Each structure stands twice: as C-alpha cells, then as structure tokens.
Amino acid sequence: MKKRISIVVILLLTAIVLLIFLGIIIGGGIISGGLFNPRIDHERMERIFVDDYDLLIIVANYLTDSKHTSIHSFPERDTGFMSVFSNDLGSQQIPISDESVVNAIETLRERGYGIISRNYDVVRFLRWSMRGRGRGIAFTIDGYPPDESIWSFFTILEPLSKNGWFFYEEN
C-alpha cells in the first residue's frame, strides 16, 4: 500500500514538473505568458480591436481630451482613478470624472488589458506582456505613426483597420 502511494505521488509530481516545463518552453512562463496568456500577433490583435473598439474609443477620447499629457491607469489600482504626471505638480492620483470611462476601463480589464496610458500624442492599451516585452493597441491623436525619436522602444508598429490605430510591440 505504501509503495502504491509513493508511485502515485511520484507520478503526480512528475506531471506537475512537466506542465511547468512545457509552460516555460511554449511561452516563457505560466503566469506572465505561456499556456494561459499566449502571445498575440497582429491578426489576433485586429480581431480583439474590432471587438473592443467601442470601449477603446471611449477611453482614448477621454484621455486625449485631458489637459494632462502623461496619464496612466494601472490594473492593480482603483479603476476610478488615474495617475498623472506634470513637471509642476509631480505625480498624483486624480478621479476619472466620466462614469462611462470608468465602466469601459473595468470591462477592458476583464477582457485582459493591463496598463492603459497616454504619453503626449499616443494612447496605449497593453494587452499582453512577458519579461519586459509588451503588445497592445496604440491610438495616435493625429492619426499618424508616433515619432520614432520619442517612441524608440516600439519594435513593431503596424496599422490596424481604423485610421490612427496601431498594433504595437514594445521592448
């Protein structure tokens, strides 16, 4: 009986180690990518973009209408607030004044989006990340690709089906 229990325990441990190993090989880790968060390519991001467009445009319009040019909404913080930065005041938390924007951000979070931010003329919606790399959707206020001198960390920037929207990869 003890021998049978030992064999079962060894088999279970072997199976767990094998699953972890496969997760690392397939995508770099189970939690930050891998089996439960597969990397998103341009084609898949286009489908996600079409499905989420109505929510994305609500948030993008709100952020581009803001007087702040450096805005971040982090998934681990309250959805009803955003972090803003200015040279005069430094960093501070301010409430989001439009309930439809709060609801849109909450829904985007439920659909797998991470950090949502605006820096100057670009609004970014991070959808996938692993080990310092990220992929997502970017919106530019003027409809043109962002200036490479400012956004040099974009390693991929390809247009999506609507003007001013891009699939991006950052490093």
Image (cartoon, rainbow, N blue to C red):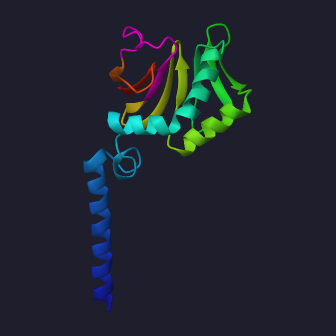
Q: Nearer the viewer, residue 76 or 118?
A: 118
In this picture, residue 129 sits left or right of residue 75: left
In this picture, residue 15 sits left or right of residue 120: left
Q: Residue furthest bottom?
A: 1
In the image, is residue 160 above or below residue 38? Answer: above
- In the image, residue 40 lies at what x, y percent? 36, 39
Magenta range is 137-152
Tell me the chief SS of the magenta region: loop
Q: Residue 170 occupies which quadrant of the picture?
A: top left
- Give me the residue at 54% from left, 24% from top: 117
- Give me the residue at 40% from left, 26% from top: 160
In this picture, residue 78 sits left or right of residue 154: right
- In the image, residue 38 lies at what x, y percent? 35, 46
Tell me the quarter of the image containing the C terminus.
top left
- Give me the residue at 36% from left, 39% from top: 44
In the image, is residue 118 above or below residue 56? Answer: above
Q: Nearer the viewer, residue 102 or 70?
A: 102
Tell me the quarter of the image containing the N terminus.
bottom left
- Give me the residue at 63% from left, 24% from top: 83
- In the image, residue 149 lies at what x, y percent? 38, 8
Question: Quick check: can you spot residue 78?
Answer: no
Count every numbered label the image shows and give the total.
0
Q: Is residue 148 magenta?
A: yes
Q: Residue 156 occupies which quadrant of the picture?
A: top left
- In the image, residue 82 lies at what x, y percent? 65, 27
Q: Is residue 16 magenta?
A: no
Q: Nearer the viewer, residue 126 or 158?
A: 158
Q: Residue 158 occupies which quadrant of the picture?
A: top left
Q: Nearer the viewer, residue 5 or 79?
A: 79
Question: Quick check: can you spot residue 15?
Answer: yes
